[in-house]
Amino acid sequence: MERFKNIQWSQIGPLAPPRDLELQGALINRLRDAGRLESFLRQAGHAHHAALLVVNDSHRATPTRRILEAIATVASNLDNAPEFRVLVATGTHTVDDPERRQFEESTFQGCGLEISGVEWHEADNRQMLVSLAGCDMNRLLAQHRFILPIGSVEPHYFAGATGAHKTLTIGCLSRDDIERNHAGAMSPESDLLRLDGNPVFDDMQRVLTQLLSEERHVLAVNTVVNGPRILDAAVGDPVETLRRLLPTVTRAFVHRIPSPVDVALLLVPLPLGRSLYQADKALKNCQGAVRAGGGMVLEAPCPEGVGADAFLRLLRRTQHYDIARQIVDDEGYRLGDHKAVKLLYLTDPKHRNVNVAVVSPNIDGRDLGESRIAVFTKREAALDWLAERLAGPSATGLRVQDAGVVGVMARRG
């Protein structure tokens, strides 16, 4: 630990661009831009059809309540505002009943919209699914002509970016179709903020195109958020609004440092820090900041422990990236394999050879089997472990706040 005692830690995290929509009034004005939201609400009201709100679950930091209140302000000026039904898009997340009740109470009660019911998507519940847009999707999407997905745009290490397009597709698909989509994450074309040519994004866009071609009115509300602050917002087509917000996302969340550091300390608070499965995004987002043979410390509370542990199957079978790729090629992709394969590329001595430590009071090192990932309950112990393994007379360090949504790349090296 001696060589780490005097380490000069640089610190980065999400940045607030000059334009800031933190004030609710500014958000309402943005939602009124071009009158698209008002027109959508008016059409749904006159058609006497309930509109379907599709929202992220509590695993995401989308400011859904504030957006609903802003929508309600726009709707209050209409003679015949629509009634809403809500679909909570969970993807493959599992959310227990107490968490569901808490989310519904804090998000929907008293938001100003007339909500007739709330349904939570369950990717394994065949009774919830129908054939739609070339895959199996939640049946409520087939039952509604007016659909209003709400999302928040963040960098994503294999989907390119999150947003309402992902809420409406991955959030509402069957497990088999999510697995089919995520198999694209094995491709080198799937990368942070890469959309065009990314097989994961291309598949989501294909599903959206088919949804839009089947006489549905789909209007997305996308936001860029930094903690409690709304940095930007856009209303319109799910993909068009995503692209419109990408410059703000890049300014706020993507950092380019002069050269790779020896050690990166990645801090992942809730909600992404709720499990190792979710917090792992930080390692992928920031791997470009660390030199080959360097070290990364992932620090997250992980109250749910490992979380969805399917990705551990490969980590328990091999420590080698090339063998893991061969296993996937021979046996076929299974959901979560991409996480293990990308992690093994990071840790394998034949590839990046990065030493990875996880710091959490709720992760048992035995859960990770014989993987090259070390588990500690204290940051100091993790740094001690790295100090024994990193070669060289000195160390440079980078501390990354909210690393689950921040991407870091080095200009050199």
Image: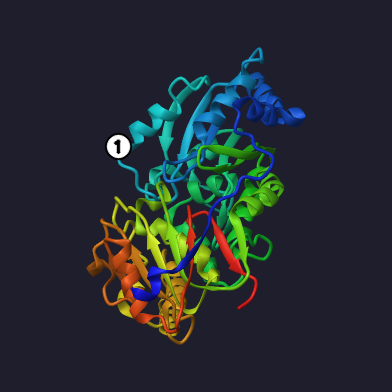
Q: Quadrant of the N terminus?
A: bottom left
Above or below, 109 relative to 376: above
Residue 360 falls in image quadrant = bottom left
Asked whether residue 213 appears in the rendered view, the answer is no
> What is the tally of numbered marks visible in this picture?
1
Q: Amino acid at mark 1?
A: Asp
Whether residue 407 sits left or right of residue 87 in the image: it is right
Task: Please give the name of the residue rendered at 40% of the width and 80% of the height, measured from the top-left corner.
Answer: 390
Residue 192 falls in image quadrant = bottom right
Residue at the disc numbered 1 = 97
The spot of residue 388 in percent (x, y) is 33, 80
Above or below, 224 relative to 275: above
Asked whether residue 272 appears in the rendered view, the answer is yes
Badge 1 marks a residue whose secondary structure is helix
The spot of residue 217 in percent (x, y) is 66, 35
Q: How is the image coloured?
A: rainbow
Above or below, 323 relative to 131: below
Task: Please give the name of the residue rendered at 36% of the width and 81% of the height, measured from the top-left corner.
Answer: 389
Circle 1 packing at 10 Å, graded few (<14), some (14-19), many (20+), is: few
Q: Give the residue furthest to the bottom.
A: 350
Task: Please give the name of the residue rendered at 54% of the width and 44% of the height, measured from the top-left corner.
Answer: 226
Q: Give the residue furthest to the top.
A: 79
Residue 315 falls in image quadrant = bottom left
Q: Quadrant of the C terminus?
A: bottom right
The spot of residue 20 in percent (x, y) is 65, 37
Q: Give the residue furthest to the right.
A: 34
- The residue closer to the viewer here, 215 or 296, is 296
The spot of residue 327 in percent (x, y) is 40, 80
